[in-house]
Image (cartoon, helix red, strand yellow):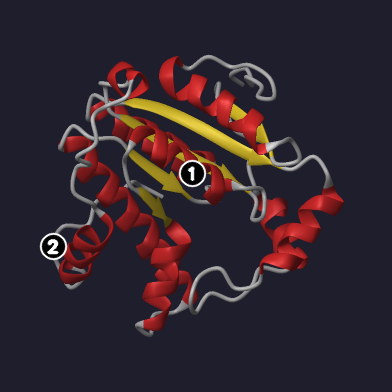
């Protein structure tokens, strides 16, 4: 799979619509010290199995960086409602959030991608996108070391996106069977740990790439 950027053709109108819908105007609030330190745009990818806290932590990062979070599942569900097949809508959603992230980086602004990202090729494509646009790439993998807690969270959350069916534990097992280990250093956040600890680790990683408890740096393979 290549990192194709959709600009023309029959999907052009959808691309323009998504840009208008998901790309907010620049915030008026004065920058914080952290935001000043983050003057170089970041492309932050949140990956991991369903129910591990990706979307929650992606929103935390969005607040820190004051930038949009582009969720693949949100776009996927929207495309399904337009009548596309599940598989085709999934690939289109991937391409669309890639395009939206590229637009942000080209404007000198950070972007966050929230997606399972089960395959290393996808992660590499986004890292190369950041490099081409002069941005800093940050990879975050969300896990949950407590299977009972992981399962309980899935059971209790119900429908989170209109038109998107609730994820079942069997779905998590299926994704896990094809989920490839990350290659290269990245931040690992454990959903079984208190959220405040994850926030602190995430802020440090966004600032300068430092890794500390409860996170872990995984060596390159």
Residue 58's tag is 1
The residue furthest right is: 148
Q: Secondary structure at mark 2?
A: loop
The residue furthest bottom is: 83
Q: Is residue 3 left or right of residue 162?
A: left
From the viewer's side, name the closer residue of 173 and 34: 34
Query: Number of marks in the image?
Result: 2
Q: Point out residue 30 in the picture as x, y percentages from the top left corner.
A: 23, 30
What residue is shown with label 2?
8
Query: Which residue occupies 54% across, 34% down?
Result: 140
Query: Which residue occupies 52% across, 47% down?
Result: 117
- Quarter of image, res 122: top left
- The vertical placement of 95 against 89, above or below, is above
Residue 221's tag is none
Q: Is residue 221 left or right of residue 112?
A: right
Q: Is residue 50 left or right of residue 65?
A: right
Q: Is residue 180 left or right of residue 64?
A: right
Crowd rating for badge 1 (residues with CA inside 10 Å; few <14, some 14–19, many 20+): many
- The vertical placement of 32 against 196, above or below, is above
């Amino acid at each position: 799979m290549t990192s194709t950027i959709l600009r023309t053709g029959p999907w052009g109108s959808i691309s323009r619509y998504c840009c208008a819908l998901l790309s907010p105007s620049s915030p008026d609030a004065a920058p914080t010290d952290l935001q000043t330190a983050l003057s170089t745009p970041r492309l932050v990818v949140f990956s991991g199995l369903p129910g591990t806290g990706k979307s929650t932590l992606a929103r935390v990062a969005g607040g820190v960086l004051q930038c949009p979070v582009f969720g693949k599942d949100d776009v996927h569900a929207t495309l399904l409602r337009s009548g596309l097949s599940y598989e085709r809508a999934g690939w289109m959603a991937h391409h669309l959030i890639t395009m939206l992230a590229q637009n942000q980086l080209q404007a000198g602004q950070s972007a966050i991608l929230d997606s399972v990202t089960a395959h290393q090729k996808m992660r590499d494509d986004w890292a190369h996108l950041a490099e081409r646009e002069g941005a800093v790439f940050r990879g975050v993998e969300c896990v949950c070391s407590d299977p009972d807690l992981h399962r309980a969270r899935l059971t209790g959350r119900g429908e989170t996106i209109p038109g998107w069916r609730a994820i079942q534990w069997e779905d998590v097992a299926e994704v896990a069977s094809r989920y490839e280990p990350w290659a290269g250093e990245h931040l690992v956040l454990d959903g079984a740990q208190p959220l405040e600890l994850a926030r602190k680790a995430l802020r440090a990683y966004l600032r300068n790439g430092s890794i500390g408890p409860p996170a872990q740096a995984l060596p390159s393979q």
